[in-house]
Amino acid sequence: MRSTFGIKQRPPGELPPPEDGEKVGVMRRRARQRLSACGLACVADEAVLIVSELVTNAIVHSGGREITVILSLRANFLRIHVHDGVPSSHLHPKAPSNAAEDGRGLVLVQSLAEERRGTWGIDDAGATTWCELRLATS
């Protein structure tokens, strides 16, 4: 699955408009449909949550105008790749404080990746975030 969509460019600190936020739900639905169609419903819940977190981060933090979401199979892994085209100076996410109301998305992505014996990372100087989930072997 490969989906590219535009978002409104806005100044740093300004919240995204509702129509950009709605694209998160569209990407979740597309990911679930594609995974189910490929016989990968067993990993769909985790993958959809990761898609949601990575796309939300790209919309809220990138400052870019276009986001690409790619789901692909590599060996025995599902790879989720979100590219916003905008390098970031924040290549390593900070752990949120206990009182923080946000900032837990990448911690959740890391936890889900570890549970599925996978990994996650940031490439392209921060313009791409990815996650790999190991698929069950029979």
Image (cartoon, rainbow, N blue to C red):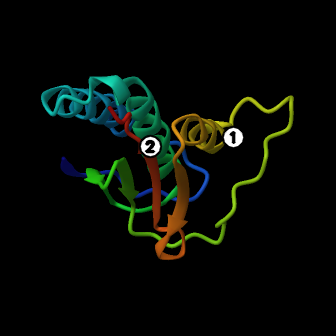
Which residue position holds label 2?
133
Question: Which of pointers 2 and 1 lies earlier in the amino acid sequence?
Answer: 1
Q: Is 17 located above or below residue 132 in the figure?
A: above
Distance between mark 2 and mark 1 Cα atoms: 22 Å
Q: Residue at x 50, y 38 (%)?
A: 53
Q: Nearer the viewer, residue 64 or 32?
A: 32
The quarter of the image holding the C terminus is top left
**Element under label 1?**
loop
**Residue depicted at x 25% and y 30%:** 40
Residue 65: quadrant of the picture: bottom left
Residue at mark 1: 103
**Residue 19 x/y as whole percent:** 32, 35
Give how far across and how far down residue 94 sits, in percent.
76, 53
Which residue is located at x 51 percent, y 37 percent?
116
Q: Amino acid at mark 2?
A: Leu
| Front one among 136 and 92 | 136
Q: Which mark is in front, 2 or 1?
A: 2
User: What secondary structure is found at the residue carrying circle 2?
Assistant: strand
Mark 2 in CB contact with mark 1 (< 8 angstroms): no
Identity, as a three-letter code, of the amino acid under mark 1:
Gly
For the question of whether residue 49 can be seen, the reply is: yes
Residue 132 vertical placement versus 107 (above, below): below
User: Between 128 and 36, which is closer to the camera in this rendering?
Assistant: 36
Disc 1 residue crowd, few under 14, some 14–19, many 20+, Cα 10 Å: some
